[in-house]
């Protein structure tokens, strides 16, 4: 237990040096914990093995020099006694370190988790029943997830709510901000005209992100309806995933389903689809958000969908499903200044035969929403001009208060103290 003037010793067993979403979230968490609680926490770090061996060749820090130096200067753990272990890797490491309390971060994109999502040295750890028993037999094992949707993943294993705390992800509001200064330069670089509507989606480009819907919408808008003013910017993550290969596979799937012709595909690639899979600094991603007109995210399954929060922080309007992992924080922001910046996609949740849950989106309704929102999307970009800053500022102030990494650090510190004192 923490006494007056005594720091709590926390070992962060995680990924730090790769541009993976878990590593990025972990680094923002620990950086802001350090900036706000270095007088209360002794930090130790241990870089854990990556999910894929080839990721070892992709090590890099992608933050500001200040943040990079903070990460480089953390103490590497050499077996010192600690009060708490915080684990953020995949699979989710359930191994206990002696009798020390442990907090395991997890996400559950499909609102459920099977045993393959966990790792444990116990050779008996081979069934969902054993996972449930292990959780019951280890009362010092705590977990945290970033959304109500994700938290459902552990409920079937009987993890009590007091050991399954929801702590939202956050955004660095000093990085993701309204800044119109580079908008035209970037649009010119990508040959996007002033009256074009630039849609954007960034990330791993896996199918659950709704990529097939996005590409199919673009094709119908441009090639079938003649709306050449719609353009799409996709940013993959070549350091970790074969994003370009995903794109090629999706086009082949659409061709096999007679949803796109070879000629239509070639036209999009030449004129309306912008693709980059470079790992960019956060300031450059913020520039992309400021250059775009709408963040399009018709996701089927997500653990949190951090990029939509980052887009909103930059003032970029988003189009997202009304159900799923974004539901709580999107509704929260919507009712606290974000109503001009959020367009909801009609959706409902369905359960698949394997027990996984995901959003169900009617493609025709999505397409019609984009069509019917064309003038609104164009007008929304005016909210990011100097005359529209007031509308954006109300939303941004709320994001700073409730969804910044500083706020996340506060919630994590409170949870750490709670775990240690139990």
Image: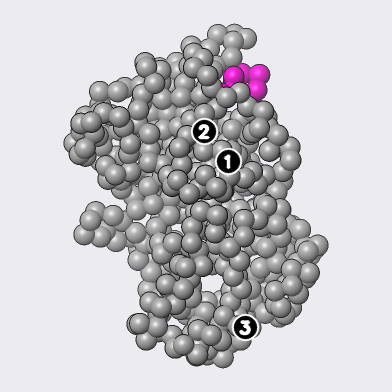
Which contiguous range is marked in magenta?
A: 36-44
Where does the image place residue 266, in percent across and percent down from the top left?
53, 85
> Do residues under tags 3 and 2 come within 8 Å of each other at their CB atoms?
no
Q: Secondary structure at mark 1?
A: loop
Residue visible at 25% across and 23% down in the picture: 137
Residue visible at 66% across and 68% down in the picture: 292
Q: Secondary structure at mark 2?
A: strand
> Do residues under tags 1 and 2 come within 8 Å of each other at their CB atoms?
yes
Where does the image place residue 75, in percent across and percent down from the top left?
61, 23
On residue 47, which mark appears? 2
Residue 55 seen in this snapshot: yes
Q: Which residue is mark 1?
A: 17
Mark 1 → mark 2, Cα distance in angstroms: 8 Å
Q: Which residue is mark 3?
A: 271
Q: Splitting the image into 4 quarters, where does residue 335 fall?
A: bottom right
Q: Earlier in the sequence, mark 3 or mark 2?
A: 2
Residue visible at 67% across and 63% down in the picture: 288
Which quadrant does the C terminus fall into? top left
The residue lying toward the viewer, choosing from 165 and 89, is 89
For discs 3 and 2, the disc positioned in front in the rendered view = 2
| 359 on left or right of 372 | left
Structure colour scheme = one colour
Where does the image place residue 399, in percent across and percent down from the top left?
62, 47
């Amino acid at each position: 237990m923490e006494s007056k003037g005594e720091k709590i010793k926390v070992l962060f067993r995680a990924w730090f040096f790769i541009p993976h979403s878990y590593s990025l979230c972990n680094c923002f968490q620990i950086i802001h914990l350090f900036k706000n609680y270095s007088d209360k926490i002794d930090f130790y770090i241990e870089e854990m093995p990556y999910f894929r061996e080839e990721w070892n060749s992709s090590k890099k820090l992608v933050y500001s020099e200040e943040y990079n130096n903070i990460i480089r200067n953390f103490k590497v753990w050499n077996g010192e006694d600690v009060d708490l272990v915080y684990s953020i890797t995949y699979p989710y490491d359930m191994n206990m370190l002696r009798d020390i309390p442990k907090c395991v971060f997890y996400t559950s994109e499909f609102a459920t988790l099977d045993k393959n999502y966990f790792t444990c040295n116990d050779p008996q750890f081979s069934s969902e029943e054993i996972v449930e028993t292990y959780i019951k037999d280890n009362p010092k094992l705590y977990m945290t997830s970033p959304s109500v949707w994700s938290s459902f993943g552990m409920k079937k294993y009987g993890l009590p709510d007091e050991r399954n705390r929801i702590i939202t992800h956050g955004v660095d509001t000093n990085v993701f901000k309204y800044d119109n200064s580079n908008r035209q330069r970037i649009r010119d670089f990508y040959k996007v005209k002033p009256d074009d509507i630039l849609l954007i989606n960034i990330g791993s480009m896996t199918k659950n992100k709704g990529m097939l819907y996005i590409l199919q919408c673009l094709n119908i808008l441009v090639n079938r309806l003649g709306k050449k003013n719609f353009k799409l910017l996709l940013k993959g993550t070549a350091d970790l995933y074969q994003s370009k290969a995903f794109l090629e596979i999706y086009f082949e799937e659409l061709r096999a389903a007679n949803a796109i012709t070879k000629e239509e595909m070639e036209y999009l690639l030449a004129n309306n689809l912008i693709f980059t899979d470079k790992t960019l600094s956060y300031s450059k991603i913020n520039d992309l958000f400021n250059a775009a007109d709408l963040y399009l995210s018709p996701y089927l399954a997500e653990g949190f969908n951090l990029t939509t929060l980052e887009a909103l922080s930059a003032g970029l309007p988003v189009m997202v499903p009304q159900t799923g992992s974004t539901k709580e924080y999107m509704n929260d922001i919507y009712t606290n200044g974000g109503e001009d910046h959020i367009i909801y996609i009609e959706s409902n949740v369905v359960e698949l035969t394997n027990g996984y849950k995901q959003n169900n989106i009617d493609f025709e309704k999505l397409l019609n929403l984009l069509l019917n929102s064309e003038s609104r999307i164009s007008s929304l970009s005016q909210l990011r001009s100097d005359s529209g800053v007031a509308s954006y500022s109300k939303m941004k102030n709320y994001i700073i208060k409730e969804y910044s990494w500083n706020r996340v650090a506060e919630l994590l510190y409170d949870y750490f103290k709670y775990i240690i004192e139990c």
